[in-house]
Image: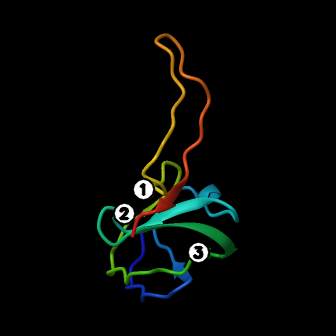
């Protein structure tokens, strides 16, 4: 987690009590805070000791003592368009793609 609060617009955080430092790697995703409220999914861009820099910058401030999730990270997304075509037959669902965007 993180022991001090993080201001909105911040792009780095000093982490505490990270059980497995292999998660602190450039390119990995992490969730800061509770994604169902003010938390956010971010991607690590740099690591220096226990301090990580990430993108995008935080939209919302995070209170001290917040959680950090690695591995099975969470993001809140919604469909970018109301019209989705999923090609299906009764016994087969063919490949399809969805356009999604981060919900705000």
Mark nearest the camera among 2 and 3 is: 2
Q: CA distance from mark 1 to mark 2?
A: 14 Å
Q: Secondary structure at mark 3?
A: loop
Say whether disc 1 or disc 2 marks the residue closer to the N-terminus.
2
Q: Nearer the viewer, residue 89 or 1?
A: 89
**Visible residue check, residue 19:** no
Vertical relation: 102 (above or below) 87? below
Residue position marked by numbered label 1 in the rendering: 78
Residue position marked by numbered label 2 in the rendering: 35
| Residue 96: percent from left, percent from top | 59, 35
Quarter containing the N terminus: bottom left
| Residue 47: percent from left, percent from top | 67, 74
Say whether disc 1 or disc 3 marks the residue closer to the N-terminus.
3
Q: CA distance from mark 2 to mark 3?
A: 22 Å
| Residue 44: percent from left, percent from top | 63, 69
Could you classify mark 2 by the number of other residues whose Cα lies within 10 Å: few (under 14), some (14-19), or many (20 or more)? Answer: some
Could you classify mark 3 by the number of other residues whose Cα lies within 10 Å: few (under 14), some (14-19), or many (20 or more)? Answer: few
Residue position marked by numbered label 3 in the rendering: 50
Q: Secondary structure at mark 1?
A: strand
Q: Quadrant of residue 103?
A: bottom left
Taking the image as shown, residue 37 lies to the left or right of residue 93, namely: left
Q: CA distance from mark 1 to mark 3?
A: 32 Å
């Amino acid at each position: 987690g993180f022991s001090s609060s993080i201001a909105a617009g911040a792009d780095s955080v000093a982490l505490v009590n990270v059980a497995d430092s292999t998660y602190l790697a450039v390119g990995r995703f992490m969730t800061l805070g509770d994604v169902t409220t003010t938390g956010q999914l971010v991607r690590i861009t740099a690591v220096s000791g226990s301090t990580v820099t990430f993108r995008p910058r935080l939209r919302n401030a995070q209170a001290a003592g917040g959680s950090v999730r690695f591995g099975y990270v969470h993001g809140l997304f919604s469909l970018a368009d109301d019209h989705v075509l999923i090609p299906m037959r009764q016994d087969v669902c063919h490949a399809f793609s969805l356009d999604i965007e981060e919900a705000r």
